[in-house]
Image: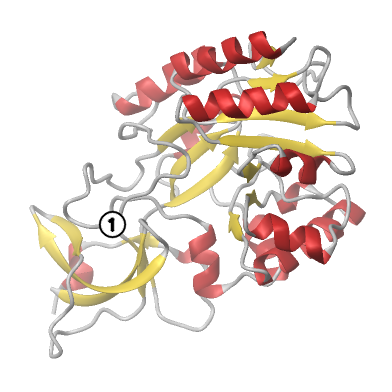
Amino acid sequence: MRAVTYLDSRDGAWREGVATVVGGQVRVHDEPPAPDMPRLEGVLTGGFTDAHVHLQLVDHAKLSGSPLARVVDLGGNPDTLARLAAAARAGHNSGVLTPTPTSAGETTPIREDSPELCPPGVVEVVFAGAFLTPPGGYPSDRAWAPEGAVREVADTADAARAVAEMKASGAAVIKIAGNSTAGPVFTDDIFRVLVAQAAAHGLPVVAHAEGRGEAQRAVRLGTTRLAHAPFSERLTDAEIAAQATSAVWISTLAIHTGEAYAIAVDNVRRFHAAGGTVRYGTDMGNGPTPVGLNPRELDALREAGIDGRKLLRTLDPAPGTPWYLTPGDAIDPLDARPLTPIDLEA
C-alpha cells in the first residue's frame, strides 16, 4: 500500500490516492492517504489516448503493449471499423482488446470501481466511421482512402440519413470533412444539419478544417472538436480566444513541415495559453507514423509550450491499469510503464 499522486481521467485533475494490490493487480483508490503512509514517488496515469488515428492504414496489432489504451479512428469504412472494434472487445486481433466504447470525450477515473479495468496492452477503439463530405469533396479523390471510408452527402435530407447510418454502425463521433483547398465544402445549411443530427443522436462532431477561414467556420457552425490544430493560416488573438472557449483541438503537429508546421505550433501555443484544450493526436496512418506514441508529436507539443504534467493531460489518459512515471522535473510519456505489485512492496 502506497500513497500516490494520480491524474484523474474524469476531469484531468491531479489527486492524492492510495495504491493497493487487489487480486494480484494494482488498484488506485480515490481516497486521501494517511499522513504516515509510505509514498510512491512519481505520478500515475491511465494508458494514453491518440485522438486521431486511421486504423485501416496501419498495422494496428502493434498497438498491443504500447502506452496507448484508447484510439479514436477519424475516418474509415464503418463496417470494417465496427468489426475491428467488436473483435477487439472480444479479445481477438493479435491481443488488442477493448472495453465497450464510449463517446470520444467521455472518461472515467482510474480507480477500483471503474466499470472495467483494462490490463496493459488493452486498447479501446472508438470510431467515427466514414468521412462525411460533399459530392467530390475531400478525401473522395484520395488513393489512400479505403473503400467505403467516404460518404458523400448531397443535401440536408441526405445529411440526416448519413448521420443515422454512422450511428447505426456504432460510431461514437461524427467526422465532417471541410477542405476548401481540395474541392467543394458543405454549405452552411448542410453543415448545420449534420451538427444538429449528430447532437440528436448524442454524438459529438469533429471537423477536418483546411483552407483559409475553414477552422473558424467549422466552430461557428457548431463543431466542438477540430481534427487538426489549424495550420492553413495564423489565427488572430481574438479568433484564438473565441476558439479556446468553444472547441477542442487535436494536435497532429508532426504531420506538417515548413510553414504549415510553424503556423500550427504558433496557433497551439497561443490557444493553450488562452486556456484552450489540446488533445494529443497524430493522424496515425498519414505517412510513416509510428504505431504507438509518436516522439515527434510529443516534441512538437513541447515546442508549443505544453510539457510536464500539462503534457500528460493532453494525452487524455483512459481508465484502467495505472501507468507509472518516475519522479523528476522532465516527465516523459515515453518512459511510462505499467505499475506492478512489486512497485508497492516495502
Color style of the picture? secondary structure
The residue nearer to you, when weighing 141 against 336, is 141
Residue 189: x %, y % from top left: 74, 24
Q: Quadrant of residue 326?
A: bottom left
Q: Quadrant of residue 110?
A: bottom left
How many callouts does the rendering have? 1
Q: Residue at x 20, y 66 (%)?
A: 30
Which residue ends up furthest to the left in the rendered image?
23
Q: Element type at marker 1? A: loop
Residue 264 visible = yes
* Amino acid at circle 1: Ile
User: Which image quadrant: the C terminus?
Assistant: bottom left
The residue labelled by disc 1 is: 110
Residue 296 visible = no
Q: Residue at x 73, y 39 (%)?
A: 218
Residue 82's place in the image compared with 103, above or below, is above
Judge left or right: residue 321 versus residue 218.
Answer: left
Q: Quadrant of residue 145?
A: top right
Residue 111: x %, y % from top left: 22, 57
Q: Residue at x 73, y 67 (%)?
A: 269
Residue 188: x %, y % from top left: 77, 28
Q: Residue at x 52, y 12 (%)?
A: 165
Residue 268: x %, y % from top left: 72, 61
Judge left or right: residue 216 versus residue 111.
Answer: right
Which residue ends up furthest to the front in the rendered image?
189
The residue nearer to you, when weighing 216 against 336, is 216
Which residue ends up furthest to the bottom in the rendered image?
36
User: Which image quadrant: the N terminus?
Assistant: bottom left
Residue 345's place in the image compared with 222, above or below, is below
The residue nearer to you, when weighing 43 against 335, is 43
